[in-house]
Image: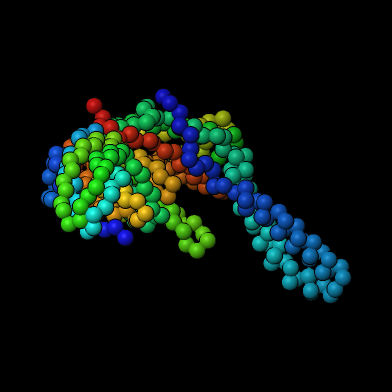
Amino acid sequence: MPLITPTRRGCGGRACLFLFAVPWTAFAVFWVVMAAATGPWWFALFGVPFVLVGLALLIASMLPAIVGMKVGRSSASLSRDPARIGETVQFAYVLPFRRSAVVDRVEMRFVFRETAAYQRGTDTVTENHDLELDSHRDQPGALRAGQAYRLEKTLLVPPDGMHSFAAPNNKLRYLVLIHAALAGWPDLNEEFEVRVLPEEAS
Amino acid sequence: MATAEFAIDLRGGADEEGFRRYAPGESIEGVIHVVPDDTVECRHLWVRLVWHTEGRGTRDSGRAGQVDIFRGSLRGGEERAFDFRLTAPREPWSFAGRLVSIVWEVEADLDVPWSRNPRFRQRFIVAPPWHADLDSLRATL
């Protein structure tokens, strides 16, 4: 079956957050140290909240790496890529584990997503609306190092549905959303696109 | 500024409560009626199939095809009719959703020198015959 690559993997793109968190935290620590060394001790307390914020940003930015210590790179495949309107396709998903873990639950949702992007001032705002077509929920429990969680699901592209569409500001996509909740670890979220052609399944 | 009155009669396809619906790849035929206010030298009378998005997002648009159906002089107040034929695009299909809608139109564009081109658009539906969900599409037209 053809492999498909995720449109979103792990805990989201955190590189910008990391690049921001490093100088923020470094300056906050530097300020606290200098304040404690040159002024009254209580003056340095003013900088402590800034240090805590910086540490929180650092931890948040490293969540994908933290999850990666436990979970390997997932893979997904479709029996047909791209699919056609009214067609059933087999979706297979494998999530390997590098270390033992307790997986409280894995949720899979097959959705038709409308995405609209627009300008608000100088910001680009993106809105999504999901129409859920199918869902699946598992409670795998404890998995040992070297084991993998496997999911196979038959997905039906609705016969009266729309095909995939991508323009710069507006998109219509079929997505498989995977959400894995690991006990004591950050959750894992992944998205896989199921491309659908403007053709009827024969 | 050049102005003109237009009317577009679409033929072929199927009638969907007053709107023409064409399957992808089907022939779109029609007649464009033009009545310019003043006598104009028409460099081109373009007929185009164009789509655009509506809804929350910034507008995207595209063009599927165009034909030049007339060049010459049009007399003021005199109605002229021109036939045209184009092929319905394969995609995107017409769509009406919560955030995004896709609307197809036939556009008549009267290209006149040294003036803004008078234009007229008429909506139609692009959807395969077996595509059942047309109620929401009609709501956008």
Q: Tell me if residue A184 comes above or below residue A40 in the rendering.
A: above
- Which residue is pictured at 35% across the width and 56% down the height? B115
Residue found 32% across the figure and 51% down from its top? B112
**Colour convention:** rainbow
Left of B61 or right of it: where is A74? right
Q: Residue A14, can we see it? A: yes
- B131 displayed left or right of A125: left
Which residue appears farthest toward the right when viewing the image? A38
Query: Toward the viewer: A107 or A128?
Result: A128
**Residue B74 at x, y = what percent?**
22, 50
Comparing B54 with B40, the one in front is B40
Residue nearest the observer in this picture, B70 or A65: B70
Total marks shown come to 0
Query: Residue B91 appears at what percent x and percent y?
Result: 31, 38
Q: Give the residue displayed 31% in from the left and 48% down from the top.
A: B111
Q: Quadrant of residue A191?
A: top left
**Rendering coords of residue A168 (x, y %):** 44, 46
Is B99 displayed left or right of A191 in the figure?
left
Tell me the quarter of the image containing the N terminus of chain B.
Answer: bottom left
Q: Position of residue A166 (x, y in %)?
A: 40, 42
**x 37%, y 54%: residue:** B114
The quadrant where residue A79 appears:
top left
Furthest residue to the top? A1
| Residue B104 at least partly seen | no
